[in-house]
Image: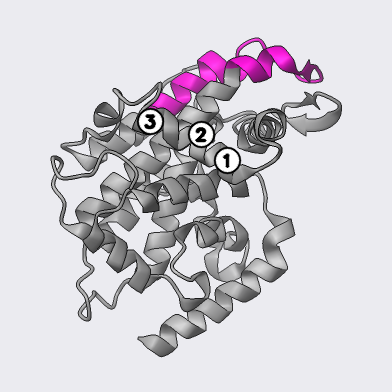
Amino acid sequence: MGFLRLWFGLFLGFVLMNEMNNIGVEGWSKEGHMMTCKIAQELLVPNAAHVVGMLLPDYANGDLSALCVWPDQIQHWYRYRWSSPLHFIDTPDDACSFDYSRDCHDTHGGKDMCVAGAIKNFTSQLSHYHHGTSDRRYNMTEALLFLSHFMGDIHQPMHVGFTSDEGGNTIDLRWFRHKSNLHHVWDREIILTAAADFYDKDMESLQKAIQANFTHGLWSNDVTTWKDCDDLSACINKYATESINMACKWGYKGVEAGETLSDDYFNSRMPIVMKRIAQGGVRLSMILNRVLGGASSTEDILVAT
């Protein structure tokens, strides 16, 4: 086990050094994914925190967020090409709804090949974990990293976008003074602009502000509702439905290709992006606490420690 963890750590280290500048527009940016995973890890019950630490390669130094972008970095490698469709959901144009049986498939019609199906699959894989006797059919470290990443993806509204524009990827526009596209605006532009305008580009300060909003601030009364989940499959479908609703109401609305988005768009959408990062982190902790920590729905901790 120690050798495998060391090898996987060296492998991931190689990936991170060689691929850090080649991250595509699949999901939150590096910063969004890292904040999601930091929030989640700080909310883990002790048993779940211990298992996560055991599953992470030595290279990560116990920090889940250090590897939360790994699924983006390897999705175009031959060995992992199968994972590319798992980062998003394409829904019918202007339907503004999500239906698992209708929408969760790849371009070849392969069932369950979408981010909602991926979360269900990797949660199921992690549920087989038992220290020293985990099911050898599954790579538990990879399952942890895929689940953690995809919980970020499903909370990014443009990841449950329209089919024809690939979740806003083909809607080219300008973000203030530089070229971008609608998907990338939600992936990264809003996050970086918020960090620059309010936190002197300090991502840790931005993350702490997000956490403060759900521990004792604006969203503190909503956290229990965010984590409410009696049926994981239904909950994951709900998360996807939330995202397509927000994509319709806030992502696409009023946006035309070629236009410039600036203060009005940023100021009205920035709170939504921050809330979705918070929800993704809180809900990821809920899943990990239940499958790895043995916590019930009433035992999940509600505030950061």
- Kindly identify the amino acid type of the residue bearing the numbered disc 2: Ala
List the single residue furthest toward the right.
177
Furthest toward the bottom, the residue is 3
Q: Which residues make up the magenta segment?
A: 240-268
Quote the CA–CA distance across marks 1 and 3: 15 Å
Residue 7, x across and y down, in percent: 50, 84
Q: Label 3 is placed on what type of residue?
A: Phe
> For the residue carrying disc 1, how many other residues have a C-alpha within 10 Å: few (<14), some (14-19), or many (20+)?
some
Instruction: Please tell me whether residue 246 belongs to the stretch shown in magenta.
Output: yes
Q: Quadrant of the N terminus?
A: bottom left
Judging by the rendered image, the residue that carries numbered circle 1 is 205
> Which numbered mark, 1 or 3, is in the foreground of this view?
1
Q: Where is residue 290 in the image (x, y as percent from the top left)?
A: 20, 52
Q: Identify the residue shown where x is 48% and y is 71%.
A: 61
Q: Can residue 69 be seen in this view?
A: yes
- The percent coordinates of residue 238 (x first, y second) are 32, 29
Res 214 label: 3
Q: Is mark 3 on a helix, strand or loop?
A: helix
Judge left or right: residue 116 versus residue 178: left
Kindly identify the residue that appears in the image at 75 percent across and 18 percent down. Answer: 262
Helix, strand or loop for disc 2: helix
Q: Does the magenta portion include 252?
A: yes
Q: Which colour scheme is used?
A: one colour
Which badge, 2 or 3, comes first in the chain's sequence? Answer: 2
Residue carrying label 2? 209
